[in-house]
Each structure stands twice: as structure tokens, then as C-alpha cells.
Image (cartoon, grey):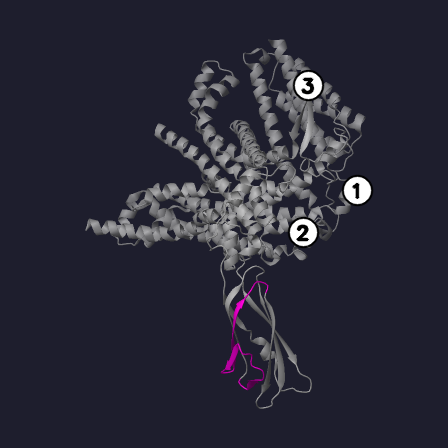
Amino acid sequence: MNDTLANTEKKTAYILTLPAVLLVFAIILFPIFANVWISFKEVELKDIRIPEPRAKKILKSISDEPSKIKILYKLRNSSLIQEIRDVSFKDSFPKNFEIENLDKRCEYKNSSLKCEFGTWPAKYKENFQVIFTTNDGSKIDKKSLKSTKPKLDGKSDNILLNTNFTLKNFKKVLFENEFLDLLLTTFYYTFFGTVGSIVFGILTAQMVNQKFYGRTFMRSVLLFPYVAPVVALAYTWELLLDPNSGTLNSLLLNYQIIETPINLLGQKYIEISILGFVFKLRLALTTVIMFEIWRYFPLAFLFILARLQAIPKELYEAADVDGASPFQKFFNITLPQITAVISILFLIRFIWNFNKFEDVFLLTGGASGTRTLPINVYQQGFAISDIGMGSAVSIVIVVLLLMFMFFYFKLLGKRVDEN
Amino acid sequence: MRIKNTILFSLISTFFLIFLISIWKILATLQGLSINSFNIEIIFIFGLLISLTHLGIGDRIKSIYKSIIFSAIFVFCDGYLIQKLPIWYNVGVFLILYFFTNKISKYTFIGLKEEHSTQVILFDFLTLFGILFFSFVILFPFYMMLVTSFKTQIALLVNPLDFSINFGQDIKDLFKSYFVIFKSYKFGKYIVISTIVSVGTVIITLLFAIPAAYAVARLNFFGKTFLSTSILIIYMFPAIVLVIPLYTIFSQLGLRNSIEGLLIVYTATTLPVAIYMLQGYFKSIPKELEEAAILDKLSWFGIIIKIIIPLSIPAISSVALYVFMIAWNEFLFSLMFLDNPNSFTLSRAIQYLSGDAETPRQYLMAGSVVVTLPVLFIFVYFEKYLVSGLTAGSVKG
């Protein structure tokens, strides 16, 4: 009895989880494996369309002979690179039609025309013409002729499914395209974005954790950048920072703080001299990092605030009795209480900033020294149209990601053990 | 000690006042006033004088009169004699000064002698400064987005700093950008598509996630632990590594440029977090309720419909709102999968608009307002639910 109960429970569980598991498998896990497959192939964007035989039907009436009609089919192979085998053709006509010039590849039976065209090489084109007469001499109705469309079929190889593999993509990714620079940019973007958002998160959480008028409102406002659509925010920032008519530059010019506009998103380097030392700051990258911090510190804020509110009040009361100063309280009570949250936040944000695509893409498109790995996937795959290369970069991302995750779950596991 | 604290207090409060007035001046400049300098020196002197006299006078005058007197003197000297600016600007300055003098009124000459008062002063003013700074930094772009959408290209060329809105003009002229994007750029259609996609994603995700989460939370089956841990790992995989394979497959299946294609992808990407959030909540529902239901011979379907769902409305609304937000804001997949303007979502439509360098910026900003408002409205209205959704789903974003 118990056994059958356990069995039905199992069965129910599988029925309940199967749809979700299948969908996630098809859309998330399968593509990750497909990436590995594609990354070892030389595939371009134009190759992924499956070649199709196509026909365009053109009707030409013959003057003075209303019971006769010429039909021209413009046949072609849609692919510029692949052949199509066993092309078959079928079109049907009214019952009273008789064919005048039957091509030897075709047969006309039961008022339908069937042809076997054999193999069409890439770029194949042919003008295929047939002439019909009505056997009862009636006038031909062009409209009904136009409404039927020919059916074509053929076999072709799917370039994605053949077994020609190459290491070319990985060689190119790792040894060309300034891979080191790419990694370094990604690292800067990820690291400073993460640290910045956590620092701002701590500051704001500490701030909102105190009592003041309009505190709930403030908490909502602080989350605005995170919940608003990235497209709207990125374009607003772009308009604010625009060198020609942007508000920020206009303001700075107006107050005579600067003399010429600064192109914050379009300038790769800016020279800054501090105490006689001149060093180059990556300006566009810094701006993009600022945007990232602005957009994601609310998340750190939310996490840290939740933790702060859980700190027992007695700790602070005891510190007050001992005569601790506000800074002592912050460094000796608050900070130790939130280090755990911060370390987890750091890893999560690090992983996510590492993969961030939209923000940089919308702000600079990867120009002026802001090309990160995710941007490179897009540029290789869609701007240069080299799908194989794009996949190879994706694989690099996945491998690095798995390494980060390994650390993340080790840390998480350790924390679970401690509790 | 007292002298050091007095100096510190007057300096910090003065800097705070400079900061307040500067923000007000920036906002006023953006209303078209020609203010070419912050006059920091003058405000600095005034600030010092005000905080020192405040300490000097102490309790001898009621603090409300003190505030009004200080504010009035400041406005008279700064706004009227030196800068000759319109009344609304000076009213603003008066209110700022009133706020400022109220803030410093709790500090007394005697109080400055206390232990730690240096740090207390620093902490208090840093908090105040932080609140204002962050409010400004966060709200400023949103404010600019809104006001730019009401301007015209020519007006902005004439004076790029004048963002004042002329409410006297005809409604049609005021909302011209909005009329244009709805008429010429088919934004009405894009709103419908975005809504269908987002609401559709929410419904399908919940349909798939509730049974799965129930199974993970309650039933024993082979592979359960594997499933619940892999949910989190899968969730960590970013969209960018899925894009190329999905693009090729969707191209070959003809799913690009279709709402169905987006629905499938959005559902799959939000399912893991939905299951994760829901199973956590389902576990907290007392088991006894279901045991009673099993005795009543209710099937699992009946249990989910009659017991689990009614009891987890808060968690389900959290998930629904969070998924809606993700789907509404999503950009990468809509960029990849949609290239026909007839099937754009709002985000994609705005990106398409910006691709044309000729597009006036007020149209772009009007579009941005249209896409932002629903999300912000939902967020403010259902904040309680969304915040818990955000916290749980925050591993992604």
C-alpha cells in the first residue's frame, strides 16, 4: 500500500515538474551545449538560413488569343552557397486546361503539373515557361490562376548539422582581437562596478536605517534606477552627457567650470595630472561604470538594509551605555554584522556585471574602449556576422562563469555549514 | 574641545548650506534663469555668520522667529540685492534657509561641549547630505527625461538649459511629442505588444511554475535535490550566452519576429526564479491542511487550486509582479529576435527610434517616459510585493 502511494507521488511529481523542466532545458540548457557545437564550426549569419527552392509565377496573356495563356515561373535557389537536391514542383490548374509544350522533366495529369528538377546548385536560376489552352475555347480567368501557388520541395544540408569542425574560432578569439585587452576591460568594468555599487549600497542603507521624515518615500526612490527599463535610462543618460547639446556639458560651460565640452561617452582616454604625475584615465569606461553603479547600487542597498534592520537593537544600546561614538558603533557593530551579506553580494554582482550586455551596448555600443566580453559576442555574431566566433566568445564567458560559480557555491556551502 | 567643535559645526553646516543652494541654483538654471556662478564665497560667509549667530543667540529668541529672521536676511541680501532674480527663486531660497536653520536649531553652544559631539555632528550632516545627494542624483535623470519630452527641438537649440514647461500653450502643442510617437511611430501598437508579451509571460510562467514548485516543496521523488540546486545554477546563466544558438534555431523555425518566440524565451528565463521563490513559500504552508485534503480524496490538482493558491496569494503576486517587470524591461532578446517594426516591443521600438540620428530627442524621451511610467507606477503601488520579489530574485539583474 505504502509502496504504491510513494509511486503515485513520484508520478505526480514528474507530471508536475516535466513541463517546466522541458521548457528550461530547451531554451536554456540546450543552447549552452549548442554553443559548444557551433563554436567549433565556421558558420556565418547568412549560412543559417535553410536553402529553399522558390518560384515566382507570372501570367502573360497572348494577344488575340483569349483561350491561350503563357505562364512563366522564375525558379531559383534561395541560397548563395548551398545546393538543393531532388527539387520537386507541383501546381494545379482548372479542369479545362490543356498543356501545349510539356517539358520532359514534367508530367501533366489530373490537371496538375508535376516536375522533378533534380539538383539545383547554389545561386541556381531558371525561367521555366508553359503554355496552356482551354479545351472548350472559353476565356481564361487570370484571377483564379493567380490564386493558386506552386509548391516546391527539395532536400538540402543544414550547415549546422554537418560534422566539419575547426579550431579556428578559438585560435582567433584567444590569440587575435586583443583578447587580453578585452579581458582587462571586462574585469575593470565588473570589479569597479561591483565595488562601487556595494559602497553606495552601504552608505544609503546606513542612511535610510535612521529615522527621518520621508523615509519610506526615500526607500522607493532609491530603487527607481533598478526597476525602470534600461533603454529609457541609458538614452536619458546619453542625452545628459552628450558633448554638443547635453545638459551636463551645458551646465558646466554655463558655470565656467570647463571651457570645452567633454565627450564623456566618446573619448577613450583623458589625461589627468595629480601632483605632477600625469596618468591616463579611461574616460568612456569610467562613465559606463558610473552608470552601472547608479543602476545597480539599489540592489545592494536593499540587501544591506534588510540585514541592518535585523541587527538586534540591544547591541547598540549596550554600546551607548559603554559610551561608544557613532563611528565606533559603525565599525565595531554594523560592519561586522553585514560582512557576510557583502561577500555574497559581491560574488552575485560580480557574476552579473561580468555578463552585463544591455547597459554598455546602449550607452556606447562598445566603442571608445568599452568593449567587454558580452559586447564582443554581439559584435562577432551579428555585426561581423560570424556566428562561430560569437559562439566561441560565449564559451569563454561560460567557462569563466563556471569558475566564478564554483567559488560562489563553495562560499555559500561554507556559510550553510556555519549556520 | 568646544572651540574645535564650534569651528567644525559652523564649517560643516556652511558646506551643507552651499550644497543646498547649489542644487537649487542648478534647478533654477534649468528653468531658464541665467545664473552663471554659484557665488560660493558669499554663501560661505553668510553660512558661517548664520551658524555662529545662531550659537551666539542661543535660546534668547524663539527658534521659529530666529529661522524666519535669518532666512529673510539671507534672501534679501543674496537674492534681491546681489542677483536680482524672480520671486519664485527667492521663495525657494527662503524655504531652503528656513529648512537649514531649523536643522541647526538643535545644536547649542552648551551641547557642543559633550563627548563625541564632533562625530555626532559629522554623522548627522553626512546623513542629511546623503539623503539630498542621492535623491538628486537618482531623480535628476528621471526629471530630465520628463521635461525634455515637453520641449521642442528649436527651443532646446536656442537655449539648451531652458527646460521650463509653458503650461499656457495649447494641450496639443504641450503633448506634441506624445501625439507624434503615437501617430507616426505606432507606439500604441507597441504598448499593446509589450503588454501582451509581459502579461502572457506572467500567466505562462505561473502555469508552469506553480505545479513545479509544489512538487519541489512537497513531494518526494528521485532527482528532487538535483532539481532544486540546478534551478539556481541555471538561473545564473546570462542571456548573452544563449543568444546565438537561440537566434539560429529561431531563424530556422521561423519564430523570429513573433510574439510566441518572445513568450517562450521570457517564460524559460524567468521560470527558475519563479519556481525558487514559490517553493520557498509553499514550504511554509502547514502540511496539515493538505493532509486533511488528501483524506477528502482531493487530487493534486484540487490541492493546488483549492489550498495552495489561495494561501499563497502574496507570494504569487510577488512573482507575478517581478516577472512582469523583467518581461516589460527586457531588451536583449527583443533586440535579437525582432527586426520587423510591426512586431516591436516598447524597448525595441525606442532603440529603433534612436538608431535614426534624425529623430528629435524629445520623441526619444517621450518614448522613454511611456515605457518607464507603467513600471514605476506598478512599483510604487505594489512596492511591498515587488520588494520581496526583488530581494529573492536579486541574484539576477
- In the image, is A62 to the left or to the right of B120? right
- In the image, is B79 to the left or to the right of A156? right
For the N terminus of chain B, the image quarter is: top right
Q: Nearer the viewer, mark 3 or mark 2?
A: 3
Helix, strand or loop at mark 1: helix
Residue A227 horizontal/vertical position (percent): 55, 41
Q: How many marks?
A: 3
* Tag 2 near tag 1, CB within 8 Å: no
Q: Residues within 10 Å of mark 3 (few under 14, many from 20)?
A: few
Under mark 1, the amino acid is Val
Per the image, the residue denoted by label 3 is: A275
Q: Quadrant of residue A63?
A: bottom right
Mark 1 on the same chain as mark 3: no
Per the image, the residue denoted by label 1 is: B158
Residue B101 horizontal/vertical position (percent): 65, 23
The residue drawn where x is 46% and y is 29% is A343
The residue drawn where x is 60% and y is 39% is A371
Per the image, the residue denoted by label 2 is: B178
Chain of the residue under the numbered disc 2 shown in the image: B
The stretch in magenta equals A95-123
Q: Quadrant of residue B187?
A: bottom right
